[in-house]
Image (cartoon, rainbow, N blue to C red):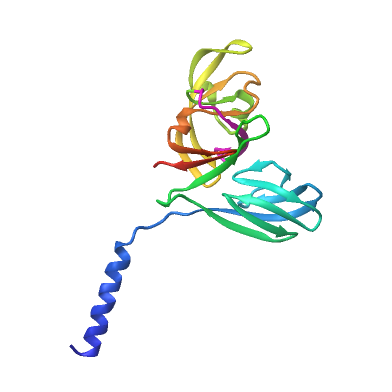
Amino acid sequence: MPNAIMCKFSLCVLVLLLTALPIRVMAETRVNVVGLFNHKAVVIINGGKPKTLSVGESREGVKLLEADSASAKFLIEGKVKVLGMGQAASVVGDDASGRPSVTLYANMQGHFISECYINGAPLKFLVDTGATTVALNSGDAKFAKIDYKRGEPVLVGTANGVVTAYRVTIATLKIGGITLNQVEASVLEGGSPSIVLMGMSALNRLNMQRQDIAMTLTKKY
């Protein structure tokens, strides 16, 4: 077989092999250090607004382990990174199948609290497997531009008594590199719950794996 034909044949085989390979979707967490202090660090996560982390605190899969005026040690998506002032790191968070994932860390009370984005609005949330749906108060709903009064009104019992809630659908809910669309939620009139309760309408679409103080959430589909 002439060389030109052989090269063309080999190229075709290579193209076929490459197109047969599975495509991996990576969820990347980017951390930029913009301020350093004793036991604290100011960081920008995934291009968002600067946030101050204290040692032991977690945001969006990023936990501050140590910090002083020279450097900070982070646990990012399960990987340890040491960064100085002005330095940045990118860590890919995914499982073996390439599905996006995020790692949360329990606080001193054993609760998993982190930050999510509802319709682009940053809000703190608590993982609550006892809640049927994602639940948020009316102030947070307004902040996330949810016209909750167009939802179906229902009466629900809370620690503060019976209150009116509205069944709504969240257009986009983002936790770290995970994005969920069209998530069922309940909006309660008043200031309770004080932070978003991440209930089963969202958690059912995620695989949850816990190891010690870490919980890894991986998107199912």
Tell how many labels. Answer: 0
Give 157 or 74, whichever is nearer the viewer. Answer: 74
Left-right relation of 37 to 9 = right
Q: Residue furthest top?
A: 161
Left-right relation of 71 to 119 = right
**Residue bounds of the magenta highlight:** 117-131
Residue 212 locus on image (x, y percent): 57, 38
Q: Residue furthest bottom?
A: 2
Name the residue: 61% across, 24% down: 137
Q: Is residue 130 magenta?
A: yes
Left-right relation of 1 to 107 = left
Residue 73 locus on image (x, y percent): 70, 53
- Give the position of the N terminus as an image quadrant: bottom left
Rendered view: 19 above or below 25:
below
Name the residue: 26% across, 74% down: 12
Rendered view: 6 above or below 133:
below
Name the residue: 45% across, 49% down: 95
- Give the position of the C terminus as an image quadrant: top left
Residue 64 locus on image (x, y percent): 69, 47
Give 125 or 75, whichever is nearer the viewer. Answer: 75
Give 174 or 169, whichever is nearer the viewer. Answer: 174
Residue 20 locus on image (x, y percent): 29, 62
Magenta part, dominant SS = strand
Q: Quarter of the image holding residue 126?
A: top right
Give 123 or 18, whichever is nearer the viewer. Answer: 18
Q: Residue furthest left?
A: 1
Q: Is residue 162 magenta?
A: no
